[in-house]
Amino acid sequence: MDYFNVIQHYYSGNYTDCLNEIEKTSNSDDNILTYYNGMSQLALKKYTPGSSASNLGKSMDAFASFLENKDASKLKSSITVGSSNGFELSLLATTLTILGELNEALDLCIEGLDSITTEEDRTSNGYIELSLLAVQIAILKGDQAAATNIFYSIEQRLTLNNEAEIIQNLAEAYVKFGKNEDTSGLNFYYFEELAQTNPNWKTQLGLLNLHLQQGNINEAQGIIDVLESDYYQVEQTDSAETFKPHFFACKITLAAMQGLNNVETLKKELLVLDPEHPLIKNDKDMNNRFDELVAKFKN
């Protein structure tokens, strides 16, 4: 089966279109379709449990439950390297990441990638997706060397087809973003082309982050204005809700760069939207460290 449209829509942020592509098929136990069906539904906050009776389908149900109750026991007990495929390992690694267990999450990804032995694993079974996740976790940890090494090992570990190259290109873009490399060159053009060919919330936010990284205040403000237009706020309502926390994080960054006085107000709004957002957590950590320093010198 050709999965190109499914994967392209998903990684472009067109989750509804991704689901529409999947609906055209009849194989509910296909692992690739099960994974992208579940992840798209979760992105839109419209998950339907029991869509697949496969092991991956059951793991996806457990992951959806975890997102609601933060109980990871079922995922941790049922998913292991050697007996679970790359898709299932991605679900567990994502779970660990959400719980803040970044070292364990990255170790799981690398152990899973190192366990690849069959040609089926090299061409499918979710290991290109696991590679992308490993890159993302390494960047989140601030370990650029690990992210770079994982990216460059993709071609050694896997046999890449057209849809896998979509994911590989995205992994490369993350690595370059994390290293502040090609910010005004190839990496910028990559996100700019995505925003032009697939104008939606995810691609616009990707380009917005590149402008913020370069300090392009006027261009960043222009994208924020676009995302606040009726086309994005009304006609793309589902996506607007999905990406709202990320949008507010960008607005906070830009407001700080502009020296505006509404930064704290925006932070409070983000706190309501997503109390676990990395910007909120980092801000809280910084405030705690500052309070510790004040207390230290006060005494």
Image: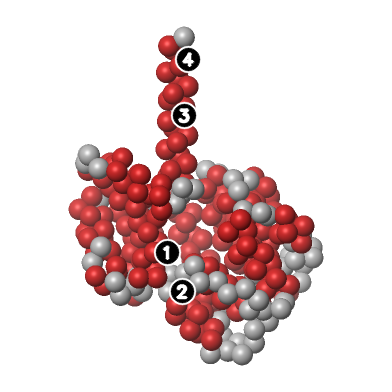
List the residue tagged with mark 1: 242
Q: Quadrant of residue 118?
A: bottom right
Q: Earlier in the sequence, mark 4 or mark 1?
A: 1
Disc 4 crowd rating (10 Å Cα; few below 14, some 14-19, many 20+) is: few
Instruction: Identify the element where label 2 is drawn.
Output: helix
Q: Residue 108, how many percent across, how many down? A: 69, 54
Disc 1 crowd rating (10 Å Cα; few below 14, some 14-19, many 20+) is: some
Q: Are marks 4 and 1 in contact (CB under 8 Å)?
A: no
Relative to residue 284, is residue 29 depicted above or below? below
Mark 3: amino acid: Asn
Q: Residue 177, how many percent across, how many down? A: 43, 53
| Residue displayed at 47% across by 41% down | 281
Q: Earlier in the sequence, mark 2 or mark 3?
A: 2
Quarter in which the N terminus is drawn: bottom right
Mark 1: amino acid: Thr
Mark 4: amino acid: Lys
Q: Residue 2, how many percent across, how many down? A: 56, 85
List the residue tagged with mark 4: 296
Instruction: Identify the element where label 4 is drawn.
Output: helix
| Residue displayed at 40% across by 61% down | 243
Q: Are marks 2 and 1 in contact (CB under 8 Å)?
A: yes
The residue sitting at the right extreme is 83
Instruction: Identify the element where label 3 is drawn.
Output: helix
List the residue tagged with mark 3: 288
Q: Earlier in the sequence, mark 4 or mark 3?
A: 3
Measure how far apart labels 4 and 3 are at the Cα level.
12 Å
Q: Earlier in the sequence, mark 2 or mark 1?
A: 2
Mark 2: amino acid: Tyr
Q: Residue 119, how many percent across, how many down? A: 73, 74
Relative to residue 18, is residue 281 depicted above or below? above
